[in-house]
Amino acid sequence: MRLHDPLNTLPGVGVGRMKVFAALGLHTISDMLFYMPLRYEDRRRTAPIGDLVPGVKVTVKGTVSSFHVRKSASRNLFVATLDVEDESSSASVVLFGGYRSFYSIRDGAGIIMYGMPLQKGGVLEFQNPDYVILRHGAEEAPPDFGRILPVYPTTKGLPRRVLANLIFSCVTSPNLSIDDPIPADMLKKRSLSGLRDALRGVHAPSDQDEINNSRVRLAYGELFEMQRKIFLAREARDRIVAKPIQQDAVSAGRFTSSLPFELTASQLQAMDEICRDMAVRRPMHRLLQGDVGSGKTVVALAAASACACAGFQSAILAPTTILSSQFYGEAVKYLSPLGFKCAELTGGTGAKDRGGLLDGLAGGEIDVLVGTHAMLEDDVSFKSLGLVVIDEQHRFGVAQRDMIYGKSVGAHVLLMSATPIPRTLCMALYGDIDSSAIRGKPSSRKPVVTRVLSDNHMDELYKFISSRVKLRERCYWVCPLIGEDDGDSVGDSSVMARTADMEKKIPGVSVAKLYGSMTPAEKVSVMERFSSGDAGILVSTTVIEVGVDVRDACVIVVESASSFGLSQLHQLRGRVGRGSRAGFCILLDSAANISGNRRLEVLTKCDDGYVIAEEDLRLRGAGEIAGVRQHGAVSLKIASLPEDLNLLEMAREDAAIK
Ligand code: ADP
Ligand code: MG
């Protein structure tokens, strides 16, 4: 029996059960053995019936000395009353269930049970204890009694006991062969147990210490394998020779002096770090982190300009059509005047344009290509790709990421993210990646005034918004739900319901809506209406979360704000106050949800995305940090962050040993 064998090689697992296992995401023996208990039930205490203490859970072994079943008042429910005795005394047992559930019980049968005896009249009584009727002559207690019993999350069609016994017999089987992926000397160095012992220790533990140590070892193993992959990928990348991109001071100066603003010190520093990376034959792999509105776009364009000066092409990849066209607009604005040719390729690009565009890329006439994952198609090829920029990189899935890396062999890679990820987590996700951070915002940006507001004040809020819209400002209104079109299921806090309500109560103001299931073309056209001012209010789901830049947007309202992560709210807030006018962010929720809600208060006082991300990490765990959620740190099954940070450190160190 090997770890990668499918589960149906185990006795008692047939087609039906395989389906249930599959629903839990379990396909192989390994999947099952890495399926962790939710909690444990300590069933080690066994006692003769004469020594039972009312109210204390215990395992008891005895013989059924009398057995009666009667129908209860409610339909289909039967009540069985048993007397169970051992040498010391006897107790009564009451069981509820369908008639058939008692089929194995008979006078004289051996029984083992676990439960809490209670004093009932003069006798001790167990109500619905967990029990098993012992097969005649069976000496050995079944594995679910008299030990620390793991309790697993399970699902319909797979009783807890079946799963627990299956795992138990598998993990204790002498036929199970296990290769430990962690080298023995590493385990020795860290005083960790081998994989076999650790698996045994979580599924068939003999005490609490064994559970703890085993869990640590498994968490370490998980983190080690993750870090090893990251390390090997990095090594492989480092072996590839990239095109060195050297930029002379004159052309670098031409880019910066053509900008309508002064670059901030941290933008300049990021540019410098990127240009140094690109100047050598080792491919750049750098993460550029910067809060929303910190000005990452122009830094990426500076890199693209350096590339173009050196005769290489750049590809800039955005997660959505909206973000792509926005980026493309900026590219044209800043790069065309310097004589560089930009083009955009998305899923919506027509066949004719696409043909010409592909020729331009292959022929080298196009210097900078901005687009969505449409540019990952096979027939898109570059004459000499020097740089790949991935904007809002965490929004690309693993498969897309691999495709991007596959297509950009030998090119320098710049990853960008608007969600500052706490340093420690960053390491978990990327290993020792080079990273540049833009701290602070261009000075033209004003802080966004943030308030937490109870939804009792809706009328005043509507008044406020309509007054701002009349000043030609724009307002975002974010709802957690879309809401169905078909009428009856329109919930509160939905885009549809909110739009309808506004159209009734704020006459004279045009309201647009935006949500994920619209086609890319529809989204672009809605954004155009909003950004041109044809629509004063945009009611949307969080699709506007990242990147969108509408200069006159000054107010953002988020409904049911307490259901969002802080980082996510902070990102949403970054959509406003981008121009020279002040921005307002209203976090709306029911009075009950806001009273005493310290979490939301953090946002009213703090404007630093890093601090907010740390706060999210502290309050809600790694899974809540936008940008981490999609990445895989949360697909960790055993380890959890930030709790296991010290293990992560160890694993990272060990994984980098050749
Ligand atoms: P993000 O980092 O969120 O992608 P953007 O690159 O979209 O931010 O920048 C936000 C806005 O700030 C853009 O309109 C951009 O033109 C402007 N901007 C960027 N850098 C500066 C600067 N140094 N001074 C003034 N405005 C700037
Ligand atoms: Mg951006």
Image (cartoon, rainbow, N blue to C red):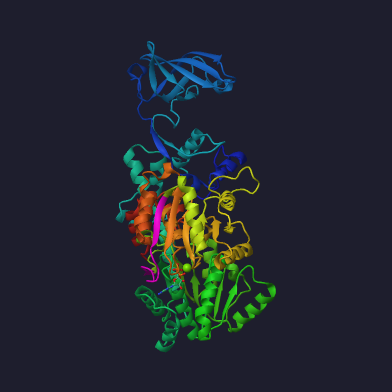
Residue 226 position, x and y percent, is 43, 58
Q: Is residue 492 left or right of residue 595?
A: right
Residue 178 seen in render: no
Q: Residue at x 55, y 59 (%)?
A: 538
Q: Nearer the viewer, residue 284 or 580?
A: 580
Q: Is residue 265 left or right of residue 496?
A: left
Residue 28 position, x and y percent, is 53, 47
Residue 632 position, x and y percent, is 46, 56
User: Per the image, is 442 magenta?
Assistant: yes
Quadrant of the snapshot with the C terminus:
bottom left
Q: Does residue 416 lie above or below 9 as drawn? A: below
Q: Nearer the viewer, residue 531 or 105?
A: 531
Q: Nearer the viewer, residue 115 or 546?
A: 546
Residue 598 position, x and y percent, is 35, 48
Question: Where on the picture, by quarter, is residue 439?
Answer: bottom left
Residue 141 seen in render: yes
Q: Residue furthest right?
A: 352
Q: Nearer the viewer, residue 485 or 586?
A: 586
Q: Is residue 347 left or right of residue 184?
A: right
Task: Tell me the magenta residue range.
Answer: 435-452
Q: Does residue 173 lie above or below 146 as drawn? A: below
Q: Residue furthest top?
A: 122
Q: Residue at x 50, y 47 (%)?
A: 31
Q: Does residue 514 lie above or below 65 as drawn? A: below
Please state the total of marks drawn on the protein image.
0
Q: Does residue 178 lie above or below 414 as drawn? A: above
User: Per the image, is 405 magenta?
Assistant: no
Question: Where on the picture, by quarter, is residue 189?
Answer: bottom left
